[in-house]
Amino acid sequence: MRNTTKILFSGALIGALAFTSVAQAEGEQQAAPAETVPQPSAQQPKEPYEVTEFFSDAQRYTIGSAVPEKYRTKTYEITEWQKRHLPAPDADSHWTYMGGNYVLISNVDGKIIKAKSGDIFFH
């Protein structure tokens, strides 16, 4: 008799757990449409590989920051930007590689115009 009680109790417990899981799943499905779609903020990039800030040489850079002189040289200039899935550089600018990211900088003052994650190369 004692074993029968254990078996019945175990079966009831397992059945209750299964019902609880189904009820939670149904509740999640109903809650999903009510969620709001996050609106892009000023800090969120508009394109999937675009970055608004990054670190290179232990320094934080953002759009508009001036890069060190070495990144403005021909040594760091990326001429085969098509192979890396980068858009054509604007007039008087070029792509360079900094801190694992591709950075479009102006030729005149070395300010960052645009930055893309290095992952775009593997896209």
Image (spheres, helix red, strand yellow):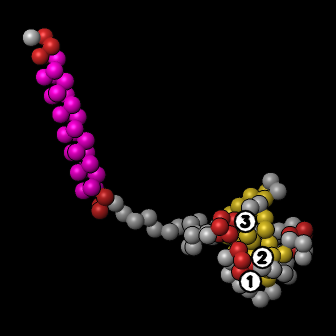
Counting other residues with Cα less than 10 Å from the Cα at mark 2, is it few (<14), some (14-19), or many (20 or more)?
many
Taking the view exactly as shown, the residue that stands out farthest to the left is: 1
Task: Return the residue nearer the eye: 80 or 37.
Answer: 80
Label 3: which secondary element: strand
Secondary structure under the numbered disc 2 in the rendered image: strand
Residue indicated by mark 1: 89
In the rendered view of the protein, which quadrant contains the C terminus?
bottom right
Residue type at mark 3 is Asn
Q: Where does the magenta region start and end?
A: 6-31
Q: Is residue 75 above or below residue 35?
A: below
Q: Which residue is mark 2?
A: 95
| 108 in relation to 98, above or below | below
Residue 115 in the image, given as x and y percentages of width and height: 70, 71
Q: CA distance from mark 3 to mark 1?
A: 15 Å
Magenta residues, dominant SS class = helix
Which residue is identified by label 3? Answer: 101
What is the CA distance from the residue labelled 3 to the residue labelled 2? 10 Å
Q: Residue at x 56, y 73 (%)?
A: 46
Residue drawn at (74%, 78%) of the image: 81
Whether residue 85 is visible here, answered yes or no, is yes
